[in-house]
Structure formats: C-alpha cells, structure tokens
Image (spheres, rainbow, N blue to C red):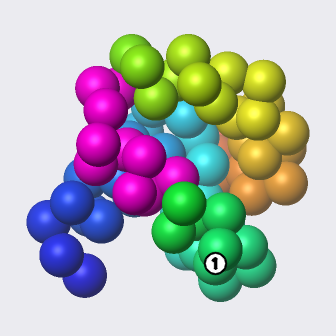
Amino acid sequence: MNELAEEFASYLFQKKKINAECFASEEPERYAEWLALFSAVSIKNFEQQKLYLINPLRRRFRVEDESKSS
C-alpha cells in the first residue's frame, strides 16, 4: 500500500470511523474514486463533497469499538 492510500485509510478509520479494508473490498470502484479525489483536494473540500455519503458508509463499514465490547 502506498503512502497516500495509507493516509486515506487512516483518515477513514480515525476521523470517520469507517473500516477502510471492508470498504475497499466490498466497493472497490467507489473506494478508488474516493482515494483519487482525496489525493486531489484538501480534506475539508473532500468532506464537503462527500458530506451526505459518509454517514451511510459509516453505518455499513463501522469500526468496531473495542472499549464497548468489554
């Protein structure tokens, strides 16, 4: 995985609580499209463009919260 892809995966995981691995494996076309956009614009601009699409993705590819499972 290249540095940009790692940064994007980290952004999804840490800031948006989206499991990037599941997202990439289940929707590879959309993941690639978003990665390309993420590399071309600022994070703020990316969030503005994908504002209404992030929440449904968060629900589908939720990051498991380990602190709640104990």
- Circle 1 — which element? helix
**Residue 68, picture quadrant:** top right
Q: Given the current orientation, which residue lies at the most extreme left position?
A: 3
Q: Is residue 26 shown above or below 5?
A: below
Can residue 27 be seen here? The reply is: yes
Q: Which residues are magenta?
A: 34-43
Q: Is residue 48 left or right of residue 5?
A: right
Residue 6 location in percent, x, y? 26, 63
At x 59%, y 25%, the residue is 49
Numbered-mark total: 1
Query: Dot 1 surroundings within 10 Å: few (below 14), some, or many (20 or more)?
Result: few
Residue 62 location in percent, x, y? 73, 51
Was residue 2 drawn as part of the magenta stretch in this picture? no
| Residue hosting label 1 | 28
**Residue 58, picture quadrant:** top right
Amino acid type at circle 1 is: Pro
**Residue 31, picture quadrant:** bottom right
Can residue 22 be seen here? The reply is: no
Residue 54 location in percent, x, y? 70, 34
At x 52%, y 23%, the residue is 47
At x 29%, y 26%, the residue is 42
Q: Is residue 18 shown above or below 50?
A: below
At x 52%, y 53%, the residue is 34
Q: Quadrant of the N terminus?
A: bottom left
Q: Is residue 19 shown above or below 22?
A: above
Q: Main secondary structure of the magenta part?
A: helix
Given residues 4 and 37, the one toward you in this image is: 37
Given residues 53 and 22, the one toward you in this image is: 53
Residue 66 location in percent, x, y? 59, 51
